[in-house]
Amino acid sequence: MPAASYQLTSTATPKRLSDVYGVGALGSVDAASDVPYRQLIIQASAAVTLGDSSAHAATGLPIGVAGSIVLGPFDTGPLKLSEFWVVGAATVSILGIPF
C-alpha cells in the first residue's frame, strides 16, 4: 500500500484524525478504514494541539504555525489515526506510511 495523504479542517472542538476517512459518524471509529501506519507526519497551517483523546486534545502536544510532528517510524506497534485527536482552527495535513 502506498503512502496516504489527507487534510482535515480542525476547529476549536476536538476532532479525531480518522474523520478524514469520511466513514460513519464524526468522531467514531470504522475498523475497516482505520489503517495501521508505521509512521505519521502531521503538519498544521496554524497552531493546534494533538492529544490521545478528546479530553486531552487541548493539553496535548502543540504543533506551532506551519510546524509538524513526526511519529515513528516504528517496526512494531502501529499507529492509527483513530488514536489521535486535534483541536485548534487550522488545516491539518497528514502523511501516513502504512505497514
Image: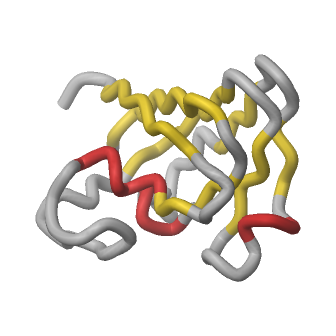
Could you tell me residue 77's position as x and y percent?
A: 50, 64
Tell me the quarter of the picture where residue 81 sits.
bottom left
Residue in the picture at 33% in, 45% down: 20
Q: Which residue is more in the foreground, 46 or 39? A: 46
Could you tell me residue 60's position as x and y percent?
A: 82, 63
Image quadrant in which the N terminus is located: top left
Could you tell me residue 71's position as x and y percent?
A: 66, 43
Relative horizontal placement of residue 18, taking residue 73 as reference (left or right): left
Image quadrant in which the C terminus is located: top left
Tell me the quarter of the picture where residue 41 sits.
top right
The answer to whether residue 28 is above or below residue 70 is below
Residue in the picture at 80% in, 65% down: 58
The answer to whether residue 3 is above or below residue 20 is above
The answer to whether residue 45 is above or below residue 8 is above
The colouring scheme, among rainbow, by chain, secondary structure or one colour, is secondary structure
Could you tell me residue 79's position as x and y percent?
A: 49, 57
| Residue ranking furthest to the bottom | 55
The answer to whether residue 53 is above or below residue 39 is below
Q: Which residue is more in the foreground, 50 or 9? A: 9
Relative horizontal placement of residue 34, taking residue 89 as reference (left or right): left
Residue in the picture at 72% in, 55% down: 50
